Image (tube, rainbow, N blue to C red):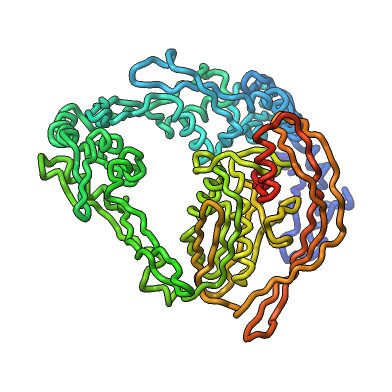
Amino acid sequence: MSHAPPPPAEPPRIPERPAWDPPGAEPGAGGDAGDPGDPGRRPGPLERFAALPRPAVIGGVVALGIGGALLVGSLVGGDTIAPGTTVNGVDIGGLTPTAAEERLADELGPAADEPIEIVIGSADESPEDSEPLELDPTAAGMAPDFGATVERANRPSLLGRIIGRTGGEVDPVVTVDEERTREELAALGEQGGTELREGAISFEEGAPVVTEPVAGTALDVDGALREVRYAYLNDSVERPVELPVEQARPLIDEAEIERALREFAEPAMSGPVTLTADGESVSVPAVVLGNHLRMEADGGGTLVPEFDGAALAEDPSFVSATEDLVQQPRDAVLGLDGENVVVREDARIGRELDAERLTDTILPLLTEEGSARSAGAPVNETEPRLTADNLDELGITEQMSSFTVNFDPSPYRITNIGRAAELISGSLVMPGEIWSFNETVGERTEENGFVEGIIILNDQYQTAAGGGVSAVATTMFNAVFFAGVKPVEYGAHSFYIERYPEGREATVAWGHLDNRFENDSGNAVYILASSTDTSVTISFLGTKKYDEVESVTGPRTNVVEPGTREGVADDCVPQPPLEGFDVEVERVFKNGGEEVRRESYRTRYTPRDEVVCDDNGGAADDAAEAAADGEAAEAEE
């Protein structure tokens, strides 16, 4: 009997298990990688790697090497700028951002401060015909930002470099202060383009003159801002940079000009205008009116008249034409009747033209005809300060002081002393005011009514206009002295003049020495001055502050004898000798017979040297009289 052979033996099976102990399994329950002969042991990492197919192992190693290289390459090479990168032709490729920024500052920085040449177009000329202007980028608030420019540049990784990635031209980043740029452009706009001229009508020599309207161009500031922003540091933009303009058309047309001529301009110049006041009438010629008249556009396409009444009021021709309508107020003229103050001539109210109302008065008359071109003058009354009714209110009730200086008659003395007294008389000095001899009398010139006479200059008699006026100055000083008011500025002659009270006399010199006093009496002071051929008298009218003011003169001290010298000038005037000395005068104030206070005035006189001249004829006679009377001008008048 035959037997079937036995089945082949099966290889031993390894139980399937997870790569790691499942959660909850006891440690070592599934075996570990300790004993290779342990059928339950887990294979280690090297065994698992060895079990991988060889192609997979080779590919993984290659991929890992490439990735690492790329990582390192990106860290090392990604912070440099791509080759071939330029900014306005400056190559910054391959540089770090810091180095690139420094190169741009070196290469482009100077150009950033250079003016931008511009041209403003106009309606009637091509840009080539316009005058180029320059825009200062710094003043316009324009500057390059090289850091921001570098940020725009491409910085490729190693892979990008491996595959040949390069840079290109990068536009520079520019910062612009638009407000400053607009201001600079607007200023340049005033120099370029053509100005719009509206039609207008002026008047010359009493006839209308037409100004024809002309269209103009104005800079388009917004458009110009865009153009200069783009052109700044941009070599590709042609210079000069052409800036856009806006057209401006006049509102006044020919029809409006014809209407204005017909309805206003021609009638306005058809004849004079008449102004009347208080029975007086004056005629103002059209030629005078036309100097202050225009027709201008009102912004709505209409020409309207503009008349400057204030300027007309100051026009010498108008002032002359209307002088009969205008009169200055005149204070009352006072005098003395014994010790009493009387009104010799009452005050007169003044009239002055109201310049602000002249326009409203005259403008409506210009389109009228004949007698309708007449109107009452716009005048205001001006009140005098002193009238017969306000004497008591001002406190002008009595004579405060009076002083007289006598002199030998001489034509120049009579003229000069009389003229000075005329200018002084009637002065009204209110409480607290300061009166000035020089301001009241004015410069002693022929135009002011003075003639040449003997003066003292450089301690010597000479001739000049105004000689003799010191007699009036001395009279004024003594009127001030005995009125008890306060002297502010005065000066004695350099050497003593015998006819004046020593230590109580004064001279004046235009531009150098004045005779001033302050009215501290508490009431108004009226100055009354008069002269004859041999004397001048000045009286103060007001209210006495003191019952009596006395003068006490001390002895002469520090006496110095005069010398003798020869005159050398062509206009030499002989001079008799007189000693120099010091003297003190006391001013004593009394009320009720009792002294209330005292002031001291000290004067030093220099010696009057004898001056000998040859062949002076009449000048010697005048000098002898001058030595007796004493005169001074310019240095001492």
Q: Residue furthest top?
A: 128
The x, y position of residue 495, in whole percent, is: 76, 51
Q: Nearer the viewer, residue 616 or 442?
A: 616
Residue drawn at x 69%, y 50% is: 628
What is the total number of numbered labels drawn onto the structure image? Answer: 0
Q: Nearer the viewer, residue 130 or 113?
A: 130
What quarter of the picture does the N terminus occupy?
top right
- Would you place residue 347 above or below residue 109 in this image? below
Q: Seen in the image, is 568 located left or right of residue 384?
A: right
Q: Seen in the image, is 219 located left or right of residue 35?
A: left
Residue drawn at x 54%, y 75% is: 522
Residue drawn at x 80%, y 42% is: 610
Q: Quadrant of residue 369?
A: top left
Q: Nearer the viewer, residue 138 or 524?
A: 524
The x, y position of residue 242, in whole percent, is: 45, 21
Q: Quadrant of residue 114?
A: top right
User: Can residue 507 be seen in the rendering of this structure?
Assistant: yes
The x, y position of residue 57, in whole percent, is: 76, 33
Q: Nearer the viewer, residue 51 or 219?
A: 219
Q: Seen in the image, is 637 located left or right of residue 607?
A: left
Residue drawn at x 41%, y 67% is: 386
The x, y position of residue 254, in whole percent, is: 18, 27
User: Can residue 80 be seen in the rendering of this structure?
Assistant: no
Q: Seen in the image, is 436 located left or right of residue 105?
A: left
